[in-house]
Amino acid sequence: MNRAVIGWTVALTLTGLAGAQTQNQQNQQNQQQTQPGVQLRDNPTLTRAMQALGQSNLFEVMSSESAVQRDVQGQVREFAQRMITEHRQNQQQLETLSRRLGVTLPTSVGAANEARIRTLERQTGAGLARTYLQAQVNGHRTTLTTLETAIRALGGQTQGQGNQPSQGQSTQPQGGQGQGQGQGNQTQPGQDNQTQPGQGQGGTTEQNQGQGQGQGGNNQQNQDQQAQQQGEPTVEEVLQFLEQAANVVRRHLQEAQQLLQSNR
């Protein structure tokens, strides 16, 4: 009888110890996931990546607007219109994150990018499309490298072959999205006469756009206030943003490379 009692006692003790050890391991894993010990504020690699992305967003919007205004056509025009929309969206998200981290973003495209835009403005026809696409390839490739460096520094994973487009990869579904977004951009100032002639409502459209921009400014102020209330983001939040941004930049790079090949 005593041996049976002792056996059960030992078994229960071992089971309890095993359960406690498993729980401790889970707690350690959760702690590593939520508190990896990576400094976010004043992190030079992260700051460099965010500033590079901010400058890239400004350049992509300005160069794409220049290409559209200079009447680039076809798939290249659709691509440029999509660059305007998607990089503006990314810039808004980046600005909110930068406020939470105390990162100052650039307010200009930089001297090198200004020179590229001036070169673009001197081009016409097929030369305009090739110059624009080559600038997109170079810019997106540089930005992608910087983002991937920051992702690895924070413990994330990157796609090792992200800079190379898969052979035979089609961008037609993305092009379809670009058509929808491009149609939304056709009412931007400076494009009414080219894309929607004969409607006779250009003034009303511009007034509506002005009201929309004013509302957008108020929304941005609200977002900034919310960002300040949220405080410093977690590593997981920053990694999620960087990885999503890298995926978008990688897709843009692949599209630009394919369009450049087809426009040679």
Image (cartoon, rainbow, N blue to C red):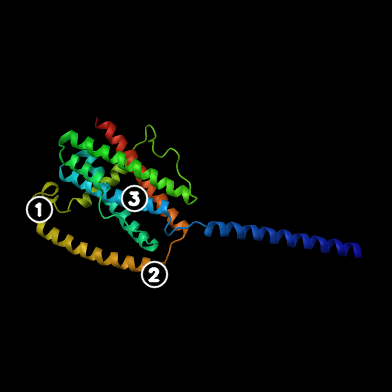
Pointer 1 residue: 199
- Residue at image location 30% in from the left, 42% down from the top: 139
Whether residue 263 can be seen here: yes
Front of the two marks 1 and 2: 2
Image coords of residue 163 (percent x, y): 39, 38
Front of the two marks 1 and 3: 3
- Quarter of the image containing the N terminus? bottom right
| Amino acid type, label 2 | Gln
Q: Are marks 1 and 3 in contact (CB under 8 Å)?
A: no
Give the mark, 1 or 3, whose residue is nearer the N terminus.
3
Pointer 2 residue: 229
- Quarter of the image containing the C terminus? top left
| Amino acid type, label 1 | Gln
Give the mark, 2 or 3, whose residue is nearer the N terminus.
3
Kindly identify which numbered label has been placed on residue 53: 3
Q: Secondary structure at mark 1?
A: loop
- Residue at image location 48% in from the left, 46% down from the top: 157
Label 1: few (<14), some or many (≥20) within 10 Å?
A: few
Relative placement, left or right, of 88 versus 187 is right
Residue 12, compared with residue 58, is above or below; it is below
| Amino acid type, label 3 | Leu
Q: Secondary structure at mark 2?
A: helix
Whether residue 1 can be seen here: no
Relative placement, left or right, of 231 versus 58 is right
CA–CA distance between discs 2 and 3? 24 Å
Q: As rendered, which of 15 and 145 lies closer to the eye?
A: 145
